[in-house]
Amino acid sequence: MIALLHRDLRLAVRAGGGFGLALAFFLIVVTLVPFGIGPDSATLARVAAGVLWVAALLACLLSLDRVFQVDYEDGSLDLLATAPIPLEGVVAVKAAAHWLTTGLPLTLAAPLFGLLLNLPGSAYGWLILSLALGTPALSMIGAFGAALTVGLKRGGLLLSLLVLPLYVPTLIFGAEAVRRGAEGLDATTPVLLLAGITFGAAALLPFAAAAAIRVNLR
């Protein structure tokens, strides 16, 4: 499992789907927002929580179509499906590799990007915590969507259509936690709900994704 994780990390970076692409996209979105809504600091502070979370969500979408597609194209996925390693474990490892190359760098860089949107100082801790808890769910849900569309032509567009509605609860609670933190309110409730989504996705979706892969490989 460790060897598979190292392999996926190397492939993600070499294929251009690593942290650099996600961070560049994140930076572009955050930079363009002030041009669209104006440079007023109060306005930027009000929308900062939602913009940061939407940008992180969209950045996570960039490399989802490659979670299983590369292995499907070179035949590695057939070998993994028949290997002694449970396919559910393979799905979990690939979701973890996606998070390590996308979600984790976004979480660490988000406070710097928050400065560009005049995010209040009281919200930075909640921003890091909410992204640390929420981005694993984005990767796991994305891996499930990638399993449903593996092998399909133009599967990337279909993947986005399938995954985006499933991302909505994570987006709502993540942005709400940051918004409450910015206003000096207690954000424990949305953070706990966010953690519940992540743990639920980690517990259930590997089995659903593995079943989808088995169907697509028949």
Image: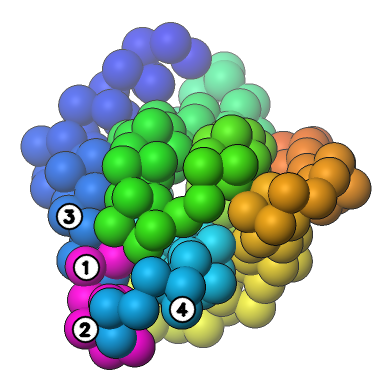
Q: Amino acid at mark 3?
A: Ala
In the visual, does 168 lie left or right of 65? right
Q: Nearer the viewer, residue 20 or 90?
A: 20
Residue 154 quadrant: bottom left
Q: Nearer the viewer, mark 4 or mark 3?
A: 4
Dot 1 crowding, Cα within 10 Å, few <14, some 14–19, many 20+: some
Q: Give the number of the mark in front: 3 or 2.
A: 2
**Inter-mark Cα distance, 2 to 4:** 12 Å
Task: Report the side of 92 relative to 39 (left or right).
Answer: right
- Report the predominant secondary structure element of the magenta stretch: helix
Residue carrying label 3: 24
What amino acid type should be assigned to the residue bearing mark 2?
Answer: Phe
Locate residue 8: give its quadrant.
top left
Check disc 3: other Cα within 10 Å, few if <14, some if 14-19, many if 20+.
few
Name the residue that disc number 4 marks.
43
Numbered badge on residue 31: 1
On screen, residue 213 above or below 145:
above
Q: Nearer the viewer, residue 192 or 208?
A: 192
Q: Residue at x 22, y 41 (%)?
A: 18
Contact (CB < 8 A) between labels 1 and 2?
Answer: yes
Query: Residue 205, percent across and down?
Result: 72, 48
Q: Residue tagged by mark 2? A: 35
Q: Based on the picture, tell me whether residue 152 belongs to the magenta stretch.
A: no
The residue segment tinted magenta is 30-37
